[in-house]
Amino acid sequence: MALPNLVLIGTFTYWPLINNIYYSTLDWTLGSASTTVVGLQNYVTFFTSEDASKVLGTTAIFTLVTVGGSMVLGLLVALALNSKVRGTTFARSAVFAPYVLSGVGVGLVWLFIFDPGYGVLAWVLRGLGQQSPQWINDPQLSLVMVIIVYVWKNLGYCAVVYLAGLQSLPRDVMEAAALDGANSVRRFFDISMPLLSPTTFFLLITTMLSSLQAFDLIRIMTPLGNGTSTLIYEAYLQAFGAYNRAGYSAAISVILFAILLIITVLQLRFVERKVHYS
Amino acid sequence: MRTNLDRRHFLGLAGLGAGAAALAACGGPSTAGPAGVVDTAGIDFSGVKPAASIDFWTNHPGKSQDVEKAIIEKFHAKFPEIKVNLVTAGANYEEIAQKFQTSQAAKTGLPALVVLSDVWWFRYFSNGSIIPIDGLVKQLDIKIDDFQKSLVDDYKYDDKQWALPYGRSTPLFYYNKDHFKAAGLPDRAPATWQEFAEWAPKLKATSGAQYAYIYPALAGYAGWTLQNNLWGWGGSWSKDWDITCDSKESVAALQWAQDSIYKDAWAGVSSKEAADDFAAGITSSTISSTGSLLGVLKAAKFNVGVGFLPGGPEVPSGVCPTGGAGLGIPSGITKEEQLAAATFLKFMTEPENTAAFSAATGYMPTRLSADMSAVLAATPQIKTAMDQLAVTKVQDNARVFLPGADQEMAKAAAKILTQQGDVQATMTDLKNSLEGIYTKDVQPKLKG
């Protein structure tokens, strides 16, 4: 039964992965029919270039803030949705909806909101006598803009998963703690959070992997990648953007793969030890 | 603690690999020999019969989808044996280039005719992705002498013709006539940027617009539009292959631009499309492609004026670059397809069709014999673009021939115009980047 799946994953994931590692050893201009083998030169070029620190820094900031932001806000939203108030069913749908929307559509709509000339945000700011920041042209603000939209789009996923976790918490433990005089804050940090640790661990892995591979919003909102060039976007720009350095791009992809692999292994080996499965 | 990590590991790694799969999905190159241009000696179309069906890849420059369809219908009526499939291959020149380069790498799915912009055709040439069309020009009797010489010469290299001009443009100075009138200014574009600097405070004070002038979006070819400023101040991105963007003239030009935003506070920078900002009334003037002309005239709710690009303190006129796109024929397709493509290329660039294209978009007619009387009667502003052609210059090598130079120029411009970065330091960094690209990606191919 596993064979068809193994064949599919091998063909469409592992074979391209191995091919990509081979391409990373080439000096290959995309579109050119021929190339030369340069060994590890593309890796040396990347790590000795000024771009390496910029790209790795941007990747780290984007990943940490989007993962942290999505998880923290998702948890807060889940706590709100877990309460017994009117309208939670609608609120759950509303919170989750952005997650299933097309990243391209979301990016285009938010670009209109952020546009300093005729965007909604600029209109509000002008009403307050303020000029709109240059969200799109200023590289630092571009990163902030993309992070805001990414977190907005993805926090619904974290909220729904956390909500499922919250609703499966054992009521008897919570009630016993309440009877013993533990207030709601203490119950949350000393009981709910430890019991939610499998959920947190699951979200940490999945959101980090998807955040490190975030592409659509960055591509639509900041096509030049000026200030928003994470590893995966830099790999795209180098090969398919203006530069056409396919071998160099493949090397960046391999570096990204190595980082993802290391993070996942470290998480599985060390973070999971702190997870309470029962 | 033992968990079901084996399955998770496996699926996790599958997810990790996905990020690396894009390039590997391509067919891949050969390490058998050096890359190079097409062996033109072997191109002979005698006895070849045109293919029955070909693909034409376009991004519909200047919102030209309807006029392209109309021209294709006329072609089908005249050449029923050749079917042309109009393919939207991207929203802009970069997207169409991306698709073309990827198909080139995949060695499949190539079109017979492709739109190639000023910054892409040379790369296609140096990668051997397009064929010289001299033989086809002769065989099909394409009247090269009837094309605008400066536009057709843009695609000449190594004594061969690599493409023909199609959606060719120059930047134009667009101004809001109503704003100019309210400010007591003459109804014309400024002769120089110094003159405009005198006008700008009056415009800002009376127009109610956010800006007197808006610089074009940096992601939208900043290297092209800022060419005007550099030339006006006696600077340039490069002289031949020497990178000169850090010269004192170039730095002075961009310092002036920065001051217009931060010190004098009458200019801004567009975030997406300056022509749209202008048509929306956000600014009293801007520079945008002639290809935006029809769109602006349609969208603007005020009287639109157009004029030549302003000169600068050192060079008061003749500081307008050519730009836009041509049409080329890929090398990786059959001779039958290439011949059919050339037949369509000839038809597409016939005088009446270039006039129709110009009427629909605002792009310049590429043929000298094109009858533009009806077009100019309907849209007299196109005459300004046509007249300006006589005082245009071919862009600096650094912008059009260095892969990725446009990106680097846009990033440098962003640093100067949106972050108030030090102009000299930014231009010095840009020079280093451009020289690196030249040394690595261009110089070896020129020697080869």
Image: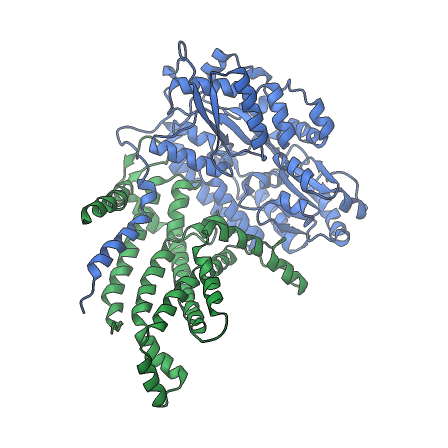
Chain colours: A green, B blue
Report x, y in % for residue A146. Answer: 48, 56
Quarter the C terminus of chain B occupies: top left
Q: Could one spot residue B415 in this view of the protein?
A: no
- Looking at the rendering, which quadrant does residue B38 occupy? top left
Identified at 34% across, 50% down, the residue is A48
Q: Of residues B404 and B66, which is closer to you in this image?
A: B66
Q: Is residue B415 left or right of residue B54?
A: right
Q: Residue at x 57, y 46 (%)?
A: B217
Residue in the image at 80% along x and 48% along y = B182
Q: Quadrant of residue B27?
A: top left
- Residue nearest the viewer, comparing A262 with B114: B114
Which residue, as the protein is rendered here, is positioned at the far bottom? A180
Residue B58 versus residue B292: which sits nearer the camera? B58
Left or right: residue B420 versus residue B210 is left
The quarter of the rendered structure image containing the N terminus of chain B is: bottom left
Q: How many marks?
A: 0
Residue A153 on image: x %, y %: 46, 59
Location of residue A68 with respect to A59 vertically, above or below: below
Q: Is residue A18 left or right of residue B186?
A: left
Q: Residue furthest top?
A: B47
| Residue B288 in sight from this viewpoint | yes
Q: Position of residue B242 (x, y in %)?
A: 48, 36
User: Residue A245: image x %, image y %?
Assistant: 37, 40
